Amino acid sequence: MKLLYPIILVSLFTIQSYAQSNDSAANQLKDKIENATTDSTRIHFQIDLAKQLIKSNVDTTRIIINDVLYTIKGKEGNYYQSRKAEALNYLGILDSKQSYVENALSNYLEALDINQGVKDSVGIGLTFHNLGMFYRRQKEYRKAKQYLKKAIVVKGKLKDVEDLALSHHMLALTYYNNEQMDSARHHISVVKGMSSSGVRKSKANGTLAAIFFKEKKFDKSINIYKENIKISKDINDQNELSISYLNVAVLYNALKEYDKAVPYLDSAIIVAKELKHKELLLKQYYSRSNLNETRKEYQKALEDYKIYKMYNDSINDTEKVKRITELELNYKFDKEKQASELRLENETSKKQLYLLLFVIATIMGGIIFWLTRKNAKHRLELSQNRLQKEQLEKVRAELTLVTKEKELKRVVVEGSLRQEILNKTLGEIKDIIGLENEKERKVALQSLSASLLSEEVTKKATSEIQSYLDKVSLDFKLILDSNFSQLSEKEKELLYLMTLELNATKISKLQSSTVSAIKSTRSRIRKKIGVGSKTDIIEFIKNSEA
């Protein structure tokens, strides 16, 4: 791997056409390749350099592309696959230029497979374009137009105007080769209307010049080709330069200015030989042979014709055409086979999916049925609980009403008692005032005072106990009234006070009783409700609600 880099660098310095080039972009790329620290970076700059050199130095370009493919070999990931497809495209271009047509088609088809696999739109557009160019060179214009139109559709969705203009230009050339001049003019006008580079528009003008030539408007045509010669030299486009030299020579020949045609043909052949472009050499030697024959230089004409015949036999090899067709058919067969296998796999997957969906549907149906039944039971339980709660609330409401009624009666009774006591006290005061004996009057007043004091104490005790009873939970009172109707009001009052965590001493004071009497009442309650001495009475009563 490391040994290949010095070879590339030596090639870059030793090949004369590259060493003499002042193309700063190529020099910068060479430096970047030399200083690259990762394979991905190096590959990127190598491909860019190959693009720079492909029109001027075929051998160096092939070395660079082969090194890129060597580096990528065995690497995974979309980035490396896209770069491999790009390298194969440029290798196909080189093979096509040098008439290795089977290799060119094989490289293009492999690149197309890779690009479609990684869904690289730029790469797909490039490969469609190259396949169109390949079939144009093979004079299969129908296929060429199909692929170029596909390239235009893909490129039209991208933002590379220059690349899109290139495909429109090549489609115009294909229509020109197929004698469809109106369509050719249309695509030339598309290129000239785009914001593409001057170089691209000059190439479109070259095609327009060819149309002028066919229409025998030689003066217009020759001026365009001479301008293109200057542009090709400026941008170091050797391929276009060779073509422009040939076209000027052909035009001078048509104008019967044979001596002017000769140097242009000689220059065209020199450049084509440097490019090793067999197709160009075929046309150029044929043209020079005819030109020399017209000039009556028959020996030169014969020599040129022999060279032309050699190139013609090499390019128009019928066996080679068969191999190209076989390659294409094999590619289509592989594609159809893959599609058939994919369809079969899809059918099997569909059946498995349907079976899985059926199983899932059955399981889901069972789950839904179970949940429905469970939900029905749950709703029934909720309905029963709701009914029980409603009944309980009704009982509570009734008990609350009864409690309030008792409280009201108690208040009324207490009011009546107060009034009765007041009336009795007033009567007694009148009687005491009526006594004539001072001593008897004093004794009577002391007796009345003691009686009133006793009633005041009782009233205060009653008020205090009532304040405690008001703190008792209504639910507890309802439980006692609902479940323990055998208990007396006095016994219930004791239980109320016990829920407030009052001890026997405190309760005895509130009820104006003794501690022993409280304990006795508590024992009596235990017997009535059937609870032992070790069980908490209050907890027992609260739990009885369930």
Image (cartoon, grey):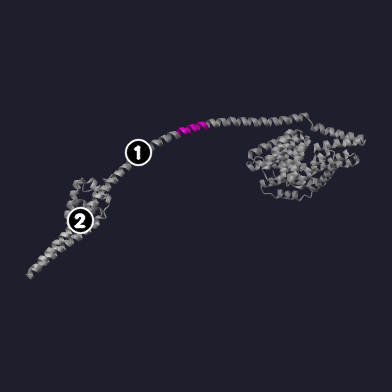
In terms of secondary structure, what is the magenta stretch mainly? helix
Amino acid at the residue labelled 2: Val
Asked whether, in this view, residue 366 is left or right of residue 156, the answer is left
Mark 1 sits on what residue? 380
Q: Nearer the viewer, mark 1 or mark 2?
A: 2
Mark 2 sits on what residue? 412
Q: How far across and how far down the image is residue 289, in percent?
A: 88, 35
Q: How far across and how far down the image is residue 468, in percent?
A: 24, 56
Gap between marks 1 and 2, in whole Å? 47 Å
Amino acid at the residue labelled 1: Leu
Q: Nearer the viewer, residue 158 or 100?
A: 158
Which residue: 92% across, 37% down? 295
Placement of the N terminus among the 4 image quadrants = top right
Asked whether, in this view, residue 116 is left or right of residue 214, the answer is left
Which residue: 78% across, 30% down? 317
Q: How far across and how far down the image is residue 417, in percent?
A: 17, 58
The picture quadrant where one finds residue 149 is: top right
Relative height, residue 402 to residue 177 (above, below)? below
Chain-order first, disc 1 or disc 2? 1
Which residue: 86% across, 36% down? 287
Taking the magenta stretch, the answer to whether it contains residue 182 is no
Q: How far across and how far down the image is residue 477, in percent?
A: 25, 50
The magenta stretch is 353-363
